[in-house]
């Protein structure tokens, strides 16, 4: 029996975000290879349901979403450090994702 699970990311929103407002963060990592998939792999180890990307290279893992932050779609335009064709948040904004099984 094959117990492997295919995982997918569901992009939720881009929100204005500052590190000082990050009480919800369970774990985080900064990487020069950051992409949504790299962040997802890191957050899976932390066993959380949500992740966020910010500053192009910062991954945040959380079990909470909906911190009543201000949506800021145009501010999540910073390329990912690991793949410049993808976006990984912005200087003071984060793209939030839900990690889920297919």
Image (cartoon, helix red, strand yellow):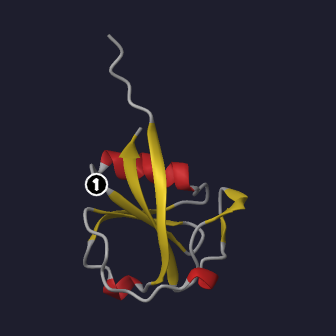
Count of numbered badges drawn on the protein? 1
Q: Nearer the viewer, residue 12 or 22?
A: 12
Q: Quick one: quadrant of the C terminus?
A: top left
Q: Nearer the viewer, residue 70 or 21?
A: 70
Q: Nearer the viewer, residue 72 or 88?
A: 72
Is 37 above or below relative to 86?
Answer: above
Which residue is situated farthest in the right direction here? 85
Which residue is situated farthest in the top direction here? 1
Is 102 above or below relative to 68?
Answer: above
Which residue corresponds to mark 1?
48
In the rendered structure, the answer to whether residue 84 lies left or right of residue 87 reads: right
Q: Residue at x 30, y 81 (%)?
A: 67
Q: Residue at x 25, y 62 (%)?
A: 63
Instruction: Specify the quadrant of the image occupied by residue 22.
Output: bottom left
Percent x, y of residue 54: 52, 73
Q: Quick one: quadrant of the N terminus?
A: top left
Q: Residue at x 43, y 40 (%)?
A: 7
Percent x, y of residue 44: 35, 46
Helix, strand or loop for disc 1: loop
Is 55 above or below relative to 98?
Answer: below
């Amino acid at each position: 029996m094959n117990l492997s699970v295919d995982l997918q990311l569901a992009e939720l929103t881009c929100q204005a975000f500052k590190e000082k407002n990050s009480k919800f963060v369970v774990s985080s990592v900064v990487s020069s290879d950051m992409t949504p998939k790299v962040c997802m792999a890191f957050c899976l180890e932390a066993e959380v349901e949500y992740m966020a990307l910010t500053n192009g290279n910062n991954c945040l893992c959380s079990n909470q979403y909906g911190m009543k932050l201000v949506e800021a779609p145009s501010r999540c335009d910073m390329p990912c450090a690991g793949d410049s064709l993808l976006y990984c948040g912005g200087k003071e904004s984060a793209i939030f994702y839900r990690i889920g099984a297919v």
